[in-house]
Amino acid sequence: MSDETEKLKEAAEEAKKNLGSPLITDQKTSSSLWFDQRELNVRYMISVERIKKFYDGLLEGKVFATRCTKCGVVYFPPQSYCSSCRSDSMEWLELAGTGELITYTVINVKPQSFSHYPDYAVGIAKMPQGVNVLAWIDSDIKSLKVGMKVKLEVKKREPENYLTYWIKPE
Amino acid sequence: MRKVGIIGASYTKFGERFDASMQELAWEAFKDAINEANIEPAQIEYSVVSNMGGWSSESLPAVIVSEALGINPRGSVRVEAACASGSSAVKLAHDVVASGQAEVVLAIGVEKMRESPSRTVVEYIGRAGNFMWEFENFGLTFPGYYALYATAYMSKFGAKEEDLCEVAVKNHYYASFNEKAQYRNKISVEKCMYSPYVAWPLKLYDCSPITDGASAVILASEDFIKSHGQEAVWISGTGYATGTANLSKRDDFTGLDAARKAAQQAYVKASIDPERPASQLDLAEVHDCFTIAEIMAYEDLGFAKKGEGIKLIKEKQTYKGGVIPVNLDGGLKAKGHPIGATGESMIAELYHQLLGKVKGERQAEIRNGKALAHNVGGTGHYAYVTILSLDKGERS
Ligand SMILES: [Zn+2]
């Protein structure tokens, strides 16, 4: 729960004592608001069975795309089927080598679930295999330039402690 | 297909509407629209409700709205095309009438974004793209997605942050005359430049706000309009397209491919020359969720050549009296951006503009009797371009 919500919750608790109902007041408009008494926490369970090799690749320090063995189209994020020629025959292809940073930003105002991080740079790199990869950029923000040479690097994201990939200037 | 016209339209005061529930907001927009259309609620045969939701408590907004407006048991459906939901609702409502299934249909958008704290809203909109590959691991935000375009655009065409701020200055200027706008303060380029970064290179004043609001558009068949004797504005063409969920699957970050495709379709349907659309349109509403988005819209719509959108705003060509006035209501930037209600509010604004009902500083000069609404969902994930006309036209 955010600090913002925590404060509202305290105000609602106080209101229940004084007014009998969890009514809080918006300070700008002095409108009465019912503070929801039912909390919903959501965590999704997302199917990755058919692209599990991608996660095996991260364990070996590799970032994999898929390639259709029939028509050669490369997919990143990895796709378990070819929507171009309708084939299910896919092979794994490592996104190795030097790419180019085609654009980037720095996220200053963060989503609630990323609020524990300092400002982070996100970029899109064009890889030599013909696909783009979006990821955080592991570099001093001030040194970034559109067109700079980059590669992909796999390491653990902290503090969550799971493997993911970064764009890293060469 | 039958001709379809708009006979009434409205939008509520936009802003942090802590004073009104979702039902009350919908009612506020509907009441004005139906009074203007001069019909009874029972004459509405179907409704399309646009709402993005997530941040608000109601899971079934279409039934909430139908009950609130007293239009049960007519059928309804909720539609989502992110920030273009409103235009998608108008398109579906149009199609129901055009195909002969109903004489009068309501498109109504409602959004209560401020039912959640702002950080939660930032989180929800950040998820509006590809959740698994762009949000879950990398915490993108809505300004962040557009900032990727701003960086690429500025790098390729030598545009400056100051140039982007010119869009905010214009839209705040017109919002200052619009009593329904969320922000009615005029700003300067300096004020915009000194505002804090939200997603570099975009600053607070480059961004549209978090907004509550509702807007309604009532559409009717040509037969109904004739017998009812109502003044109407006609829908002369709608173009629509989609873009990849993953931004990483795109090649170009200096314009929105979906918007270009939607515009080309709409121009063909409405018999507008795609080489010089600005000369045939009296004004446009474009999707300025961020200042860079308005610049790209100028180019995607063919108002300016590639890379020259900045020149258009710097020369004040999108103010009244210029090549084509854009966002005379203050745009998403200053009028506000209640995601699911934005599209209908653009169309409501153009309806009143074409009929000369806006008055004052914001009223455009109507010569051709044609106007365009460009409504983009997400970051070019959806695009709808709707062309309205005072002239019924012969094509369908
Ligand atoms: Zn294939």
Image (cartoon, rainbow, N blue to C red):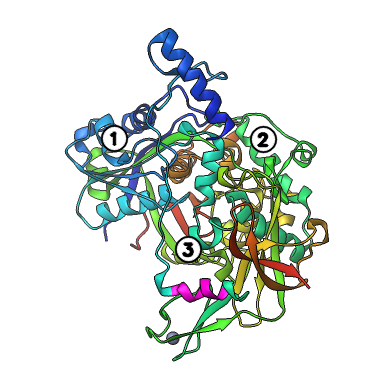
Label 2: element kind: helix
Query: Residue under circle 1?
Result: B64
Alpha-carbon span between mark 1 and mark 2: 36 Å
Q: Chain of mark 3?
A: B
Instruction: Report x, y in % for residue B140.
Output: 59, 54
Q: Which residues are magenta?
A: A51-57
Query: What kind of residue is marked 2?
Result: Tyr
| The residue positioned farthest toward the top in the image shown | A18
Provide residue A105's location: percent of width, then percent of height.
Answer: 69, 56
Q: Residue at x 56, y 76 (%)?
A: A57
The location of residue A153, given as percent across then percent down, is 68, 70
Residue B97 horizontal side relative to residue A111, left or right: left
Q: Do residues under tags 2 and 3 come within 8 Å of each other at their CB atoms?
A: no
Q: Amino acid at mark 3?
A: Ala
Query: A43 or A27, which is in the foreground?
Result: A43
Q: Residue at x 66, y 55 (%)?
A: B147
Q: Label 2, label 3: how many angstroms apart (C-alpha)?
A: 29 Å
Relative to B12, does residue A159 appear above or below in the rendering?
below
Q: Which residue is mark 2?
A: B173
Considering only order in the chain, which callout, 3 or 1, is on the residue closer to the N terminus? 1
Q: Is residue B294 magenta?
A: no
Q: Residue at x 29, y 31 (%)?
A: B38
Kindly identify which numbered label has been placed on residue B262.
3
Task: Say which quadrant the N terminus of chain B sits in.
Answer: bottom left
Q: Quadrant of ligand 1?
A: bottom left
Give the letter of the chain under mark 2: B
- Mark yes or no: residue B247 visible: yes
